[in-house]
Image: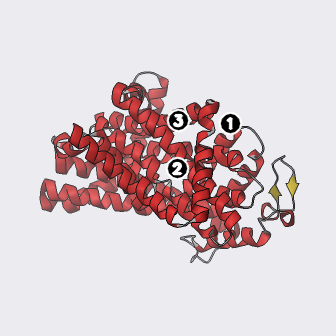
Amino acid sequence: MTSKELTRDFAGEYKHPEDTDVTVAQHEQADEDIQDNDPLKFLPFTGTTKQIINWIAVFIGVWLLLNGVGMIGDGFKLAAGDQAKELFSFAENPFVGLAIGIVTTAIIQSSSTTTSIVVGMIAGGLPLEIAIPMLFGANMGTSVTSTLVALGLAGNKQQFRNGFSMATVHDFFNLIGISIFFTLEMFTGFLGKTASAVAPSLSGSGDGIIAGVFESLGDFIDLITEPLVGVAGALVSPLGDVWGGVLLALIGVGLVLLSISFIGKLLNALLVGKAQEILYAALGKNSFFGVLSGALITALVQSSSTTTALTVPLAASGKFSVRTLFPFVVGANIGTTVTGLIAAFSASGAEAEAAMAGALVHTMFNLFAAILILGLPFLRDVPPRCSDWLAGLAEKNKLYIFIYIGGVFFALPLLAVFISNTLM
């Protein structure tokens, strides 16, 4: 039997889908949806040839992503000059930076995109202390995707309650993580200082073998990205430093948005079957395997939304509890940081250290939050309890869903900004 014909129960035993609410038809429909979203479906190739072409396209997409981040950095540097800190003085209040990250990511629905853009801006001179709250906010903003996914189950009360609880458990995990580490960062600068200490080795500017390896990698990325970034810079140069820099940065943002969407769709078409196998193989095991598989799936397909899309229907079916699937979405937070780390390699020189430090802050925040919250029993139980409570309210009245989304992702960040500006 194929992966489409099998599901796995909590004990790890394979069961035919007729014994579950997740049917073969649902799997086939999901596969058809993935193929419909394949950006290269128009090509007249199949089988191995099509896979080879798709993989080549993935590498081209990564190349375009690196070029986009490079353009953002160069454009921001041209436009801001040495005034980057003054230009973003309005975001010196960390709550403003946090709100920018939350609202921006909630709108564009990709924490990878927000992180890559912020990393590019750091490479262009944005101070790390201003960028860090934006990276925190990116984590929270992306959670709205899973909430919207669960709305598709509204026709069945029980499935909706289970699915909505699964979707929002990610939100509550991020809220707790941000509450702890954002506060810690404000008072101690722990993540920023740690990332800044590690960044030189990973950006190739430190000493030793590891720094040498990463320096070679950085030089290679410079070699393959300088031509396109240089051409783009030459095309906008007649506009002058400020407007030319703004246009170059906007072109870079557009390139990042398109390339991440392109890569995500291609990897979904190539690897979603493998992602399902990893998920089923880890079901019924401990939290460590859950986090590891969630991180691996998200790193493979470059989309935490895919991890959510795999877990929400399983929770909705009633065969797996939210607490069983919870570690997978925690792992998704870690897996999605890979894009920011890749983006950091597009910077060179002194900016490379700052860009890598920003990417590392995002990675360490997600890693440490997973260890702390899943490692402490009294904290581990809070997100599922809160999501169950919210799902119960949403089951009774769908108005609570819109109050929740509007409140958590828009009103609350703006209220925090207003209060902090009033007090500071």
Q: Position of residue 390 (x, y in %)?
A: 57, 54
Q: Tag 3, which secondary structure?
A: helix
Q: Which residue is disc 2 drawn over?
A: 171
Report the amino acid beneath label 1: Phe
Quarter the C terminus occupies: top left
Report the amino acid beneath label 3: Ala
Pick the front one: 412 or 100:
412
Q: Along the horizontal axis of the image, is 367 left or right of 253?
A: right
How far is the residue under mark 2 from the one under mark 3? 13 Å
Query: How many C-alpha atoms fall within 10 Å of the one at disc 1: few (<14), some, or many (≥20)?
Result: some
Q: Which residue is disc 1 drawn over?
A: 288
How far is the residue under mark 3 from the one under mark 1? 14 Å
Using the image, determine if residue 358 lies above or below residue 16: above
Eye-nearest disc, 2 or 3: 2
Query: Residue, x 64% and y 32% (percent of image)?
Result: 377
Q: Which residue is disc 3 drawn over?
A: 369
Q: Position of residue 367 (x, y in %)?
A: 54, 35
Report the amino acid beneath label 2: Asp
Q: Which is more N-terminal, label 1 or label 3?
A: 1
How far is the residue under mark 2 from the one under mark 1? 20 Å
